[in-house]
Amino acid sequence: MTIAAPPREGPGATPGPFDVVVLGSGVAGLSAAVRVAAGPGTKGSRVCILTKGLLSETATTWAQGGVAAAIGGEEDSVELHLADTLAAGANLCDIDAARTLVEEGPLRVKELISMGATFDREESGTLALAREGGHSRARVVHAGGAATGAEIERALAAAVRGLAVTILEGWFALDLVVRAQACRGVRALAPDGHVVEIRADHVVLATGGAGQLYAVTTNPAEATGDGIAMALRAGVPVADIEFLQFHPTALHHPATPRPLLSEALRGAGAVLRDARGARFVDELAPRDVVSRAMAQRMLAQGVEHLWLDATGIESFASRYPTIAAVLARVGLDPSHDWLPVAPAAHHLSGGVVTDLFGATLLPGLWAAGEVACTGVHGANRLASNSLLEGLVFGARLAERIADGHAAPSATGAMRMLLTARSKAMPLRPDEVPPVPARAAPRVAPVSAGPTARAWASAGGPGGHAVECPGPLRGAGSSRQAGAKNPVGERKAYLAHAMTTGAGVIREASSLEEVAAVVEKVAGSLCEVDAMHQEASELANVVAVARALVASAMTREESRGAHTRVDFARTDPSWRCRLVHGDLGAEGVE
């Protein structure tokens, strides 16, 4: 059932209480909600999905490429998928988390098909599999050519609507309710403007990423880092926040979010060309490699974009109808035209630290999907592992709740925090040592509460709210950074047009200057009596930006999606996770 406004006799009446409240309605949140509501151990539970937009207004709906899973028969295996995931993660993945993902992935894809999801198939009837960057095999399941996320969202939403799940659309979660050192619900802004407390035994963060830190992003307007910001304010550990991945081939166009030209195009033979028409990078390298090469080439040639040449792809319109329609609207014909592209902020590899069952260090609080840091992605996500992550860990979370567990286990990224347990854990002969934790610089919590006018003056979703680090980063003054910059006497830090919104690469500031801009925005926030969703979103963007910049300034190396031109090498001493929040080991199970 869908509730558009709170059932109440007077202002401020509260729905619930619930056994489980899921914040967010993407692949991770819906996967968790379906399994809690219909699971053998939790069937009959009072389940609520709270989402600030409509049920389908999520980053999942925008996802193009597909779901990576080793279902290609003898030509592929979970071991090959695991190897590709670990390689993309730049030696920062948790190997058990990555193995869990690739081993359980095929089953979750089959379950999704059983729910009614329709994926593209060959004439023989077998699933059509695409190859994307960083993959050694074709293993990406897709729908409508490049409309996979929309199909997955449709199937999961239909399943949820067929269950006894309360759906609160147009509700905005403000903060976690913490009592007696446990999460007991959320404070939320109802559609009528009242702030209410929704009680729950379990709260699941499935709020997605934080692409709106950037003006140039593939993420929808809803991606304002709400779940991560709430965790930061509650002192719940957040890690790997500096590893924000840029997608190499966003269409160079003023549209917000940027239209995405799926990685599947490069898997089908499209090539990248610079301003002179020359190829310059392996198009099927991991995304961090391709984005970094593009940023360097754009700076060296002084251009705002490069080109994706897809003229060699036959039957483009029938194979990729969604992309073809987008290109037609802007007057481009991929059979004849090279397509203007530039990297855009796309996916956050880090987030709220969890174990392999979605449990956080705060009892009663769970997280899954892009908002979570399970250790799966390490320093850079392998293409099309994100939808898979939501399917796998959303399901595992629901099963853990059904089993009655509350405290986190020393597994996945959580293992680094529960040091007493992890030191006693023997390693397999083929296992790399667990990634240790290192405290990140503490940043003061940012309170929500500026007026909508303050949000508009700083920039809103799709605007230019906050300066954040781009694919290449540097510290110090431009003179100091320029001395170490391999591309000449330019400022060492590149940013994606975060002041113009025009989708261009521009010369920008050092990390210190970026931090100053973030602090200036943070200083403009003020407490007011009435709560506003846009004001709270800005506060959340700033909170995540401060953590991201602090981690980027601290990590004095280049690894995965984090590139410092003043520390260009990967340094083994920085093989660690930078953690914001409480690093204690209380609550070990």
Image (spheres, rainbow, N blue to C red):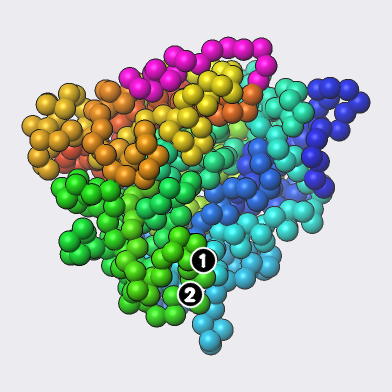
Q: At label 2, which amino acid type do we have?
A: Ala
Quadrant in which the C terminus is drawn: top right
Residue 527 included in the magenta stretch of the image? yes
Q: Is residue 570 visible?
A: yes
Disc on res. 325: 1
Circle 2 sits in a helix, a strand or a loop, which is it? helix
**Sequence order check: which comes first, mark 2 or mark 1?**
2
In this view, the residue farthest toward the right is 9
What is the distance, in whole Å, between disc 2 and disc 1 at their CAs? 8 Å
User: Which residues, given as a range, are shown in magenta?
Assistant: 516-531
Point 33% across, 41% down: residue: 496
**Residue nearer the viewer, 355 or 322:** 322
Residue 271, how many percent across, how many down?
28, 67
Determine whether, in the image, residue 165 is placed left or right of residue 85: right
Q: Is residue 221 above or below residue 61?
A: above
**Residue beneath label 2, please?**
317
